[in-house]
Amino acid sequence: MAAADYELPKNQANYAQLSPLSLLARTAAVYPNRLAVVHGDWRYSWGEAERRCRRLASALKGLGVDHGDTVSVMAPNTPPLFEAHFGVAMIGAVLNALNTRLDAATLAFILQHGEAKVLITDREFAPVMGAALAMIPAEKRPVVIDIDDKLAPPGAMLGKLEYEAFLASGDPAFAYGLPADEWEAIALNYTSGTTGNPKGVIYHHRGAYLNAIGNVLTWGMPPHSVYLWTLPMFHCNGWCFPWTITAIAGTHVCLRRIEAAAVLNSIRDNGVTHLCGAPIVANMLNNADPALWPDLSERPVQMMTAGAPPPAKVIEGAESHGLKITHVYGLTEVYGPVTVCAWQDEWNDLPKPEQARIKARQGVPYLSLDGLMVGDARTMAPVPKDGVTMGEVFMRGNPVMKGYLKNPKATDEAFEGGWFHTGDLGVWHADGYIELKDRSKDIIISGGENISTIEVEDALYTHEAVLEAAVVGRPDETWGETPVAFITLKPGAEATEAEIIAHCRAHLARYKVPKAVIFGPLPKTSTGKMQKYVLRDMAKAV
């Protein structure tokens, strides 16, 4: 048999592009009457969900949004942001879900860098979005559509269009299909990394589809699971769960604010089976009033956690309440989680603290990830699987970004040698499980959010009394890490900790503001570089 005999062309009968759009089409066709979305007292079915997404696509098309255009959305975990995950893609446009915790200057940069043609924004965020839009030249500002959510606090209208009225103008039978190429962009997410300006991470339809299905397989999710939105939907597109829950005809239970009472009440009232979040969410629930907890002894609720290595104590506490923890790991550049601490039966007989310690490891690849390696950061040779030798974590496969928007240098650096360089340092255990130990960059992860030390340092340097500044993270039981600032004042200048913190609050998003300020000379190498490892040790003692 000649190899050429097997070389038959693809055609419509035997090939289709992988895209989350097919997941919505199937679910709406097979389960049109099943509950799709819960938002307060408002509920609608999968048939209605698809019609609303079609309306959004049609209305955006009528507004002039076309293939490859960017649609930005500033909203909490509410129906409009869920609908944008499909409606925007139906016309070949790209969804840019904005981080609701960002400051106006950063948001203005993102809107301009991503060339947003339309901004859909919840009225709760009118102050910060209004300030961001004011920083953009009038001719480059996106068309604004305001979301008037009945559960939101009062807020101003920034534009002339209201979301529900805009939706009503669209066609519920709008025809949509799969992208011409599954490599086309479906989403744009910004991550600050360790530079002041965020980098735009581009997702493609193929990766979004495969990681959405990867979530189902990794978590063993049954059909019609009820998913509570405790993870921000803007964060890596909610780890692909807008598409995952749709694939299994589950129910999206929306939640505007992540508060212990709201989470636990929703678990009880809506029959929630699954939720995600950083360890801070589990810790928040651990410390909630015991009277708020529903009885989960007969139906444990599955919780997937990532964003920072979860302390064993947090895992143990959550599981004592009836949450079953699955620890995963990933980055914005890989669509959220792509590794999992897959559980082994023989671990069931271990003491609970030991089980929790094992669960804190980052684990093994998702089925959707082709390669995972801990290697020498310079040579990229794999390190020994001894649980001791440190190396950088490398990944490759379908759930890896297309690259950084308008940043070929950073893209080339990230993919050097045919692997994605995570910048995270870890060890490789004999059983093949990886475990993070440190970060090769100085990124601070606080409550699942990245904080750029350079950005915070830049803000500190704008204070007239500051001569030198350095920022490091210190461990925090609640947030995982929090920033600490080390400052040398100019000769003769004076400033207090309170003044420095107030200055930062005026220049940064609140979660990026240092929680402590230490004054004095800063340790440096012979070449003048800050010795941040010394500062990290000092920060732990504060």
Image (cartoon, rainbow, N blue to C red):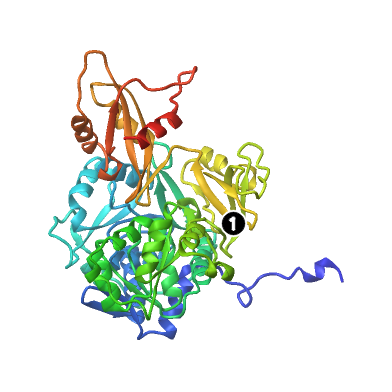
Q: For mark 1, what is the residue?
A: 433
Visible residue check, residue 267: yes
Does dot 1 land on a helix, a strand or a loop? loop
Q: Residue furthest right?
A: 1
The answer to whether residue 95 is above or below residue 505 is below
Q: Which residue lies furthest to the front in this view?
A: 351
Camera-side residue of 504 and 197? 504
The quarter holding residue 252 reads bottom left
Q: Position of residue 490 (x, y in %)?
A: 27, 16
Camera-side residue of 230 and 66? 230
The answer to whether residue 464 is above or below residue 513 is above
Q: Where is residue 466 in the image (x, y as percent from the top left)?
A: 27, 22
Camera-side residue of 118 and 529? 529
Of the 4 image quadrants, the one containing the C terminus is: top left
Visible residue check, residue 335: no
Q: Say whether residue 256 is left or right of residue 8.
A: left
Of the 4 image quadrants, the one containing the N terminus is: bottom right
Q: Where is residue 224 in the image (x, y as percent from the top left)?
A: 41, 80
Q: Say whether residue 202 is left or right of residue 460.
A: right
Identity, as a three-letter code, of the amino acid under mark 1:
Tyr
For the point 29% across and 32% down, the residue is: 459
Total marks placed? 1
Q: Position of residue 40 (x, y in %)?
A: 22, 73
Q: How crowded is mark 1: few (under 14 residues within 10 Å), some or many (20 or more)?
A: many
For the point 12% across and 59% down, the residue is: 154
For the point 66% across and 45% down, the residue is: 383
The answer to whether residue 45 is above or below residue 430 is below
